[in-house]
Image (spheres, rainbow, N blue to C red):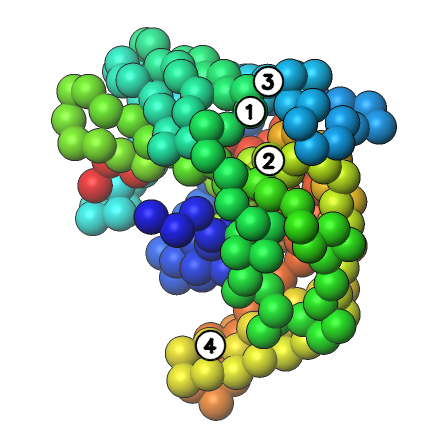
Amino acid sequence: MKNTFKIFGIVAAVAIIGLSMVACGDTIIHVPDPGPGPGPGDDERLTPLTLSGQVWRYSWRHNIRIQYNGNRTVFSDIGGSGAITDGQLSFSIGTPSRLESILNIFDEFHAQFYDFNISAPSASGAFLEPVTSGGGPVAELIRWYGDYEVVGYLFVDRNVTVTGRGRTTTDSHQIITTQDLNLNLRAGWNALHTRTENLGITDGVRNYRYAFSIGDPARMRWYLLLD
């Protein structure tokens, strides 16, 4: 499966469903600062990404949100290992087992920004998409808050700056406006925060504004998508 940065699609789906979550202080995220960052071939110097905290369950089918107290194994297609034990997440991943070109990871961003640029186009990376198994079907684990906020985790093998000027694009389903982009990615793991504003409906089409930044606000929650 192509490991693309699918934030636009994820946030749009969340916006349509209309999640309503409250702030929670029971999650701990450690996104290490690797300092100046190693170059290619120095991955052993990178600190693993560790994720932990209370997990909540969200049902697409029934539109319900409840605290999850079960047990599941957590894994991803790029490595790492962990578990949800009595509803508490514990997951760790070092250098991903598989990397791809950063050009592929940010492929869909080209159409959403003017003057889109990646400072190190030869860089490689991987986007973490954790899934869980046990006690039911395989299910995604996603970090959300409110109606329109998502955090994802991106590994890059060197320091990279991703920039672009915001623009507005329209299709038959939605109008997307992006704010100016300036992501200073450090070698290793980075938390990418996406905030979306629902601007209502314009000429019968949903209208959204997106802002991207580095960070993982404490208000975010882990949600297990079981059905």
Residue hosting label 4? 174
Report how far apart the C-alphas of labels 2 and 4 lie in the structure: 30 Å
Residue at the image point whose x is 33% and y is 48% from the top: 1
CB atoms of marks 2 and 1 within 8 Å: yes
Residue hosting label 3? 48
The mark that comes first in sequence, 4 or 3, is 3
In the rendered image, the vertical position of residue 111 relative to residue 93, given as above or below = below
The mark that comes first in sequence, 3 or 2, is 3
Q: Which residue is the extreme one toward the bottom?
A: 203
Q: Which amino acid does label 3 sit on?
A: Pro
The mark that comes first in sequence, 2 or 1, is 1
Report how far apart the C-alphas of labels 1 and 4 lie in the structure: 37 Å
Q: Which amino acid does label 1 sit on?
A: Thr
Report how far apart the C-alphas of labels 3 and 1 lie in the structure: 7 Å
Q: Which amino acid does label 4 sit on?
A: Gln
The mark that comes first in sequence, 1 or 4, is 1
The mark that comes first in sequence, 2 or 4, is 2
User: Helix, strand or loop at disc 1?
Assistant: loop
Q: Which of marks 3 and 1 is in front?
A: 1
Q: Which of marks 4 and 3 is in front?
A: 3
Residue hosting label 1? 95
Q: Which of 192 and 202 is in front in this view?
A: 192
Rendering quarter of residue 187: top right
User: Helix, strand or loop at disc 2?
Assistant: strand
- Expressed as whole percent of the image width and height from the top left, the position of residue 201 reads 49, 79
In the rendered image, the vertical position of residue 149 relative to residue 159, given as above or below = below
- Residue 12 visible, this orientation: yes
Residue hosting label 2? 155
Q: Which residue is the extreme one toward the left?
A: 136
Few, some or many residues within 10 Å of mark 3 (<14, 14–19, 20+): some
